[in-house]
Amino acid sequence: MSKLKENSIKEVQKLYEAIKASKCVVALTGAGISVPSGIPDFRGEAGLYKTKYGDYKPEVMLSRDFFDDHPDEFFKFYREKMIYADAKPNAAHLLLAELERQGKLSCVITQNIDGLHSDAGSKRVYELHGSVRRNRCMRCGRSYPGTDIVTQCSGVPRCGCGGMIKPDVVLYGEWLDGDVVRGASKAVCDADMLLVIGTSLQVSSASSLLYDYCGDTLAFVNKGGTPYDDMADIIIDDDCAAVAKELLKLL
């Protein structure tokens, strides 16, 4: 069980006071928030991008070009490395759902595709990169919720019309959903506190949102820090779930 670093305790109390004083908190989350749930991150020391899968790098296999040219290889990788059906929300997901329930948190904006925020009870979630819980036929447009259509078959999943089914995740070379981006941007603009959890902010879809923020308190909770730490009012370089457990005790 992860415990807080000694120098984090004072900052957690400071973060609690900031949340208590805020009226409209928005949370921006990344892969680090799901690591305690057993889902590897991408850029960490043991992250997905540090490994090689067969003849290709993961970044290549997660591109739209690779999906189009090598669908069998794509789905083999996708099933083994991108779907974690047994993963459960951890304290960090539960904290954000509780803050929303209390009327403190306006929404969650996440780079994650695992669906754990919804599992935890968050109602308003902007999924910047889509979700493994949604799939759509590329020919007729039929929607396939959940992951069964992908996991319970071998090879390329097919619709009843014969069309190939694509997971509703944003691959390299694809555009983000414009409505999701606009909704996330407006939420950040309207917030009086932005709580950034579990992201190194190395992806522009997330880091660009910092420039939409004009509120009172910008707080970062992330192991290893971010390139934008000089913008933050509160920085906690620690385990997301451990920080969340302490905050849940205070709420």
Image (cartoon, helix red, strand yellow):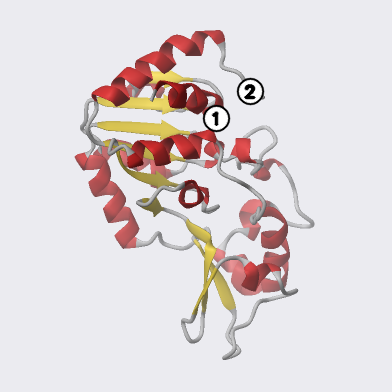
**Residue 115 appears at what percent x and percent y?**
51, 53
The residue under the point 57% across, 91% down is 161
- For image coordinates 62% across by 40% down, the residue present is 37
| Quarter the C terminus occupies | top left
Kindly report the distance in space between the C-alpha atoms of the residues bearing marks 1 and 2. Answer: 8 Å
Query: Looking at the rendering, which quadrant does residue 238 occupy?
Result: top right
Q: Is residue 225 visible from the viewing direction of this image?
A: no
* C-beta proximity under 8 Å, tags 1 and 2: yes
In the displayed structure, 125 sits above or below 149; it is: above
Element type where label 2 sits in the image: loop
The image position of residue 184, as x and y in percent, is 31, 49
Q: Residue at x 49, y 13 (%)?
A: 8
Q: Say what amino acid the circle numbered 2 marks.
A: Ser
Tag 1, which secondary structure?
helix
Q: Which mark is residue 2?
A: 2
Q: Residue at x 59, y 89 (%)?
A: 160
- Taking the view exactly as shown, the residue that stands out farthest to the bottom is 161
Q: Which mark is residue 241?
A: 1
Instruction: Locate residue 90: give its quadrant.
Output: top right
Q: Which one is nearer the viewer's eye here, 101 or 15? A: 101
